Amino acid sequence: MATALKNLNEYNTATFADMSDKKFGIVVAEWHKDITDALSNGAIETLLKHGAQKENIFRNTVPGSFELTLGAQFLAQHEEIDAVICIGVVIKGDTKHDDYINHAVANGLTNVSLKYNKPVAFGLVTTNNLEQALDRAGGKHGNKGVEAAAAVIHMLSF
Ligand code: RBF
């Protein structure tokens, strides 16, 4: 996985199984859409790189990151879906909204993952400013969407 100032494509693929028979849900928040689109594209490219079929990737949007949990549940409840990747960007503002959203999503996605016994990736970029988010969506800190996809592939190869 990426560490500070390391770009991606460095995650360990040695244990990754072929994903050609797997079905993936992707939930993308529309707040900071340009950035979440870049993260989502990173995730999709990574799934394809590891054998996933285009027609087995089901991408849906939700209004904001707070809605990622319910979006994940809508997808995870379908038996044929093997894993869900959630993508969002929450940027700190003058109030504590970011804390509430981030904790709710972290807890919510954990619950969905355990309830349905499926990998649910936390591709939520939580930053102090826009620049830090851009750095993590194809910039100097790589693309966290790529990492989120790599995480579910890793778990499906468990
Ligand atoms: N959603 C995001 O995905 N990223 C944000 O940075 C973000 N900031 C918000 C700031 C405030 C003050 C509020 C009220 C909402 C924000 N949301 C953000 C939207 C949130 O995730 C959710 O869509 C709405 O609160 C509706 O449930």
Image: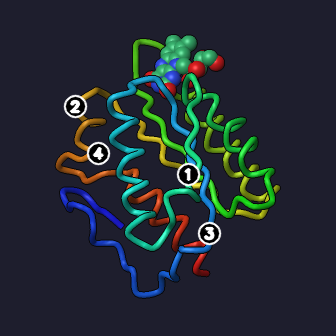
Q: Which residue bears the numbered disc 2?
A: 131
Q: Nearer the viewer, residue 91 or 13?
A: 13
Front: mark 2 or 3? 3
The image quarter containing residue 86 is top right
Q: Which residue bears the numbered disc 3?
A: 22
Q: CA distance from mark 1 to mark 2?
A: 23 Å
Q: Which residue bears the numbered disc 1?
A: 85
User: Would residue 114 appear left or right of 54 to someone viewing this image?
Assistant: right
Q: Quadrant of the N terminus?
A: bottom left
Q: Which mark is drawn over residue 104?
A: none
Front: mark 1 or 3? 3
Which SS class for mark 1? Answer: strand
Q: Nearer the viewer, residue 51 or 94?
A: 51
Residue reaching furthest top?
A: 94
Residue 66 in the image: x percent, y percent? 61, 28
Q: CA distance from mark 2 to mark 3?
A: 35 Å
Residue 81 in the image: x percent, y percent? 70, 59
Type of amino acid at the residue the image marks with label 3: Lys
Q: CA distance from mark 4 to mark 3?
A: 27 Å
Q: Earlier in the sequence, mark 1 or mark 3?
A: 3
Q: Do we see residue 10 in this rendering?
A: yes
The answer to whether 21 is drawn above or below residue 17 in the figure is: above
The image quarter containing residue 128 is top left
Q: Earlier in the sequence, mark 2 or mark 4?
A: 2
Front: mark 1 or 2? 1
Residue 36 in the image: x percent, y percent? 40, 35
Which SS class for mark 2? Answer: helix
Residue reaching furthest front?
A: 55
Q: Which residue bears the numbered disc 4?
A: 136
Q: Is mark 1 within 8 Å of ligand 1?
A: no
Q: Earlier in the sequence, mark 4 or mark 3?
A: 3
